[in-house]
């Protein structure tokens, strides 16, 4: 489960950087930021239930 969360976080980070670098793709940065936060929250909640 942790591996999936980390892979998704890496994908969202790459998409966010790509959207920031390419001028016409600011929407990609916004979507990647939202998905990054959602994935991090999901990983945190599922990880805290096991403890």
Image (cartoon, rainbow, N blue to C red):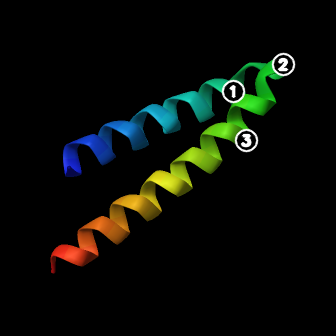
* Badge 3 element: helix
Kindly indicate whether the residue at mark 3 contacts the one at mark 1 (C-beta within 8 angstroms).
yes
**Where does residue 31 sit, x and y in percent of width and height?**
68, 39
**Disc number placed over residue 48 in the picture, else none:** none
User: In the figure, 25 relative to 48: above or below?
Assistant: above
**Where does residue 38 sit, x and y in percent of width and height?**
53, 55
Label 1 vs label 2: CA separation?
8 Å
User: In the figure, 2 relative to 10: above or below?
Assistant: below
Instruction: Give the left or right position of residue 48, taking residue 45 as reference.
Output: left
* Badge 2 element: helix
The residue positioned 50% from the left and 38% from the top of the image is: 13
The residue positioned 73% from the left and 41% from the top of the image is: 30
Label 2 vs label 3: CA separation?
12 Å
Q: Which residue is mark 3?
A: 30
User: In the figure, 10 relative to 38: above or below?
Assistant: above
Instruction: Give the left or right position of residue 3, taking residue 46 as reference.
Output: left
Label 1 vs label 3: CA separation?
8 Å
* Badge 1 element: helix
Q: Which residue is mark 1?
A: 19
Instruction: Give the left or right position of residue 27, taking residue 48 as reference.
Output: right
**Where does residue 28 sit, x and y in percent of width and height?**
70, 29
């Amino acid at each position: 489960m942790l591996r999936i969360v980390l892979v998704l976080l890496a994908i969202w980070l790459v998409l966010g950087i790509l959207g920031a670098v390419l001028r016409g793709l600011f929407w990609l940065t916004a979507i990647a930021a939202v998905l990054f936060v959602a994935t991090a929250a999901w990983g945190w909640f599922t990880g805290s239930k096991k403890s």
